[in-house]
Image (spheres, grey):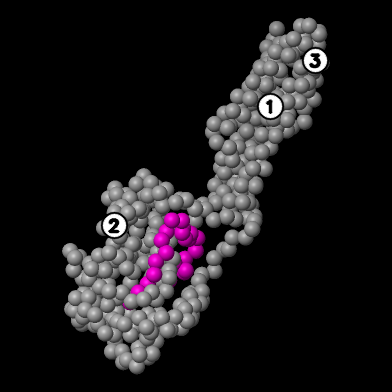
Amino acid sequence: MMVELINLFADSLNLTVEPVIIQKQDPELVHVPLIVNGKANGLPKLLANGSVDLIAAPFQVTKSRSNLFSFSEPLYTLSTSMLTHDPISLNSDIWSFFRTYTSETWTVILIALLLQISVCVMIRYFEAKVIRTKHIGVLESAWQMLRLQLMQPEKIYFTSLAGRLSIMIFSLVQCAVLLGVFSSWILTSIIRDAATDVPFESMDNFVKGLMAKKFYMISAEPDTWFFEEVNQSQVFPFKQLRAALERNPLRRVDRTRVALQAVVNDKAVVFMQSDSDTFYTSVKFCNLNRVYQDMPVVTSHLMFSNLFRKNWPLAALFNRSIVENKMHVNRILRKYKTLLTKDKPICKTKSLHSSLSIYPYLGLVIICMTIISVSFFILFLENFVHSAKKSLTKIN
């Protein structure tokens, strides 16, 4: 893209371009800091020592770069983001059915059940003693309340008005709460799986998560303006990010694909701007989120040397050409963005709803099978005890 832009400007100025080709794998020029100890390094070193007049690459303006170089008019505006992995959905967890409520909420539900059983036992005792109804024991009352809690049919007779009112209140509150476990899970699954989950809502939250080592940053492009600002700037969020990266250091890799695979397979986060190699490669991956919250919008420029060719006369001509060919620059940008879509993989798109899979129901099946197994064991035990009592009765 940048080669085409340089040719556009050169043609409009009737200039001839003599290319100098740099190998992408050159360790002294590519993916290294642009400024070291106040001196040009990497590709800008070729610009500073007069080896080349221009570099076919976009640069962003920073304070340290402005001391050594001058910059052209903005070529285009670009967005920046943090690239993260989509978290797992509710359909990926067999126990998600029971995580609709927190453990504290489940405890409250259990306490409410025990409290209702206690109330029923006291009312049963009152009815048996005063009204002379049939006495029903604690276990039978508990069993009736549990069946009602699970919305199972059970005839529960109370002669007193207090007993009837307690059952009515219990049915309205407890049964509705338990029914909410299933309805809330279904609704949550539909809404949550259809929406994009954002791991942090602001840059402040991102810094806190980075310091707490909930995730880590990785990059194959540590020479970007972003990390330059992180190392030198005293303003938010760069100063705070520098402190976080001292505790949770940036991990560097040689290839962009390796960094993106770490995002997909691990708790890695990658800084990305919309004209970087990371951006171009990320379109080939699925299940990635671009988080734009509190991220800056920057401009890209051509960079001229201040040391070797101060007040370079062609700089003004290039600036004029950039302004005059703004529509052509935008057309070239759109063309390359269109080309990117052809390399996109076939990913599962998120619709307005998400169908529920069978997987999370396995947890419910496990619980049911466990209870059924326990029931069979108790049945076998009761049969053994009953047979033993019957044998003792015959002996006597």
10 Å crowding of disc 3: few (<14), some (14-19), many (20+): few
Q: Quadrant of the C terminus?
A: top right
Quadrant hosting residue 196: bottom right
Circle 3 residue: 160
Amino acid type indicated by mark 3: Ser
Q: Which residues are magenta?
A: 279-302
In terms of image quadrants, where is residue 349? Answer: bottom right
213 or 39, which is in the foreground? 39
**Residue 347 is a magenta residue:** no
Q: Nearer the viewer, mark 2 or mark 3?
A: 2
- In the figure, is residue 265 to the left or right of 188? left
Give the labeled residue for mark 2: 233
Lower sequence index among marks 2 and 1: 1
Residue named by callout 1: 146
Q: Nearer the viewer, residue 209 or 308?
A: 308
Q: Residue at x 32, y 91 (%)?
A: 15
Left or right of residue 315: residue 76: right
Secondary structure of the residue carrying tag 3 is: loop
Amino acid under disc 1: Leu
